[in-house]
Image (cartoon, rainbow, N blue to C red):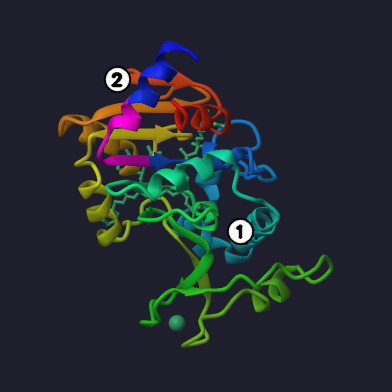
């Protein structure tokens, strides 16, 4: 075992309060595409072009088609070793898990005390803000090929269960505010002994700022990621590797 891995494994074993923040890299081994880098493109679009309210306003069918494609892919994925290790840590008192992922694979791995900063791809909300709380809908899927042109596609989009208006994915798009309760919980979780960031490019705020906040508050900070990120030089221990390989080693010091 490398010295950095051993040091982090021992710190995890000794820590009383652990906070883990995760990103798309944690689900990569399950088959969920990451946002940035290889496999991040859907057709010719980058996620930044589709994960916005402006894109949805302009072409809701295009955005829903992207989400339907992702929902179908995620439905065929299972939690991997990294999700299971994190779920194990989450059963320790004082452990909190913050995820940017909308795939719910942490939920399916049995993770406790989970804060889902960017929502869930399996939930919908009313685009018209009629007052209906977000609801879960795992059944809706994109109409089959041949039924998807223009007005037909728009008629087959999911509708609000209260007012019948257009439904949207209950996820947080660029430029949208996160749920203040989630932000409060995530900031509260920065009061910890050890803060570990896993599988995130650490560029999307406010999630990307949490590791710095935890460090400011005196936590031992660490990162496990395939590629270097803006957080790499700020943390005490940075391990370059795949979450599904490294996390099982960290769980067995
Ligand atoms: C592996 C691996 C393996 C691969 N093992 N590793 C401060 C500074 C600058 C900008 C801002 C700021 N504050 C706010 C902003 C604007 C913006 C922002 O951050 N922009 C930056 C990009 C510049 N933020 C926002 O707009 C946020 N809203 C906000 O702040 O609102 C303020 C407000 C207040 C009041 C009123 C109104 C507004 C919202 C951000 C929402 C982000 N949403 C998305 C889409 C979610 C829905 C969906 O999934 O469709 O969230 S974008 C996308 O990025 C998604 C992800 O959760 C998020 C982060 O991506 P992540 O997880 O890091 O994935 P990747 O692909 O980037 O990285 C994967 C990493 O894994 C890579 O590094 C690989 O190397 C690695 N990897 N395989 C380990 N096996
Ligand atoms: Zn409605």
Image coords of residue 120 (percent x, y): 49, 60
The quadrant where residue 213 appears: top left
Query: In front here: 42 or 171?
Result: 171
Specify few, some or many for label 2: CA neighbours under 10 Å numbering under 14, 14-19, or 20 or more. Answer: some
Foreground mark, 2 or 1? 2
Q: For residue 67, which numbered disc appears in the image?
A: 1
Q: Residue furthest left?
A: 217
Q: Is residue 2 left or right of residue 145?
A: left
Q: Is residue 110 above or below residue 124?
A: above
Q: Residue furthest right?
A: 146
User: Which residue is labeled 2 in the image?
Assistant: 236
- Say whether residue 231 is visible: no
Q: Which residue is drawn at the image coordinates 66% and 45% (left, top)?
A: 42
Q: Is residue 138 left or right of residue 126?
A: right
Specify few, some or many for label 1: CA neighbours under 10 Å numbering under 14, 14-19, or 20 or more. Answer: many
Examine the structure image and report whether residue 15 is included in the region drawn in magenta: yes
Q: Quadrant of ligand 1?
A: top left
Image coords of residue 24 (percent x, y): 52, 41
Image coords of residue 190 (percent x, y): 23, 41
Image coords of residue 52 (percent x, y): 46, 54
Q: Which stretch appears magenta?
A: 11-20
Q: Which residue is drawn at the image coordinates 75% and 68% (left, top)?
A: 149
Q: Is mark 1 within 8 Å of ligand 1?
A: yes
Q: Which residue is drawn at the image coordinates 61% and 63% (left, top)?
A: 64
- Say whether residue 245 is visible: yes
Q: Which residue is drawn at the image coordinates 45% and 43% (left, top)?
A: 86
Q: Residue furthest top?
A: 3
Query: In front here: 150 or 5?
Result: 5
Q: For residue 128, which numbered disc appears in the image?
A: none
Examine the structure image and report whether residue 27 is included in the region drawn in magenta: no
């Amino acid at each position: 075992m490398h010295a950095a891995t051993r040091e982090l494994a021992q710190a995890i074993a000794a820590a009383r309060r652990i906070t883990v923040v995760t990103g798309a890299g944690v689900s990569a081994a399950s088959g969920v595409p990451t946002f940035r880098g290889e496999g991040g493109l859907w057709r010719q679009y980058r996620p930044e072009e589709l994960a916005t309210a402006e894109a949805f306003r302009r072409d809701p069918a295009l955005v829903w088609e992207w989400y339907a494609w992702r929902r179908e892919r995620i439905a065929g994925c299972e939690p991997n070793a990294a999700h299971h290790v994190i779920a194990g840590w989450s059963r320790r008192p004082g452990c909190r898990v913050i995820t940017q992922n909308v795939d719910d694979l942490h939920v399916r791995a049995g993770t406790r005390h989970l804060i889902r900063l960017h929502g869930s791809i399996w939930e919908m909300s009313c685009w018209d803000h009629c007052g209906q709380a977000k609801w879960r809908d795992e059944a809706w899927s994109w109409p089959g090929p041949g039924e998807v042109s223009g007005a037909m596609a728009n008629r087959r989009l999911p509708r609000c269960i209260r007012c019948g208006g257009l439904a949207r994915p209950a996820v947080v798009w660029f430029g949208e505010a996160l749920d203040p309760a989630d932000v409060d919980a995530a900031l509260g979780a920065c009061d910890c002994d050890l803060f570990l960031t896993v599988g995130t490019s650490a560029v999307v705020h406010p999630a990307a700022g949490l590791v710095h906040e935890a460090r400011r508050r005196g936590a031992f900070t660490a990162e496990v990621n395939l590629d270097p990120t803006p957080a790499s030089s700020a943390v005490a221990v940075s391990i370059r590797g795949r979450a599904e390989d490294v996390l099982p080693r960290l769980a067995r010091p």
